[in-house]
Image (cartoon, rainbow, N blue to C red):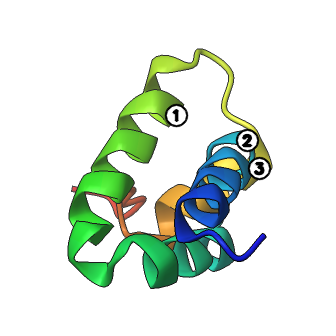
Amino acid sequence: MGNKKDLAEILWRKFRGHPAKEYLTELLEVIGKDKEKKVIDEAVKTILKDKKLDSTDITFLLDVSKVDFRSS
């Protein structure tokens, strides 16, 4: 693979197909940690558009602190 661009593309597909903190970390190591907020915001927006949340999506949202289940 040797090509950083190809690796980034593979990691993007992996992350988009299965958003998880570990995949986020791998992706950011290649594309730059400075893009973390943008990547997380995009992922959260995509997850919340879907009418069916699965446990993986919920775990990711909790891992990136985008869901707060505390009562108001």
Q: Earlier in the sequence, mark 1 or mark 3?
A: 1
Q: Earlier in the sequence, mark 2 or mark 3?
A: 2
Asked if the residues shown at circle 2 and circle 1 are in contact, with their CB atoms under 8 angstroms apart, the answer is no
Q: Position of residue 6 (x, y in %)?
A: 64, 57
**Is residue 19 among what the camera can see?**
no
Q: Position of residue 8 (x, y in %)?
A: 56, 61
- Distance from the alpha carbon under mark 2 to that under mark 1: 11 Å
On-image quarter of the C terminus: bottom left
What residue did someone put label 3 on? 55
What residue did someone put label 1 on? 47
- Residue 37 is left or right of residue 5, and the answer is left
| Mark 2: amino acid | Gly
- Residue 12 is left or right of residue 10, and the answer is left
Residue 52 image-quadrant placement = top right
| Mark 3: amino acid | Ser
Q: Which of the two marks, 2 or 3, is nearer to us in this view?
A: 2
Q: Could you tell me which residue is drawn at 57 percent across and 19 percent down?
A: 50
Check the image and report above or below for 17 versus 55: above
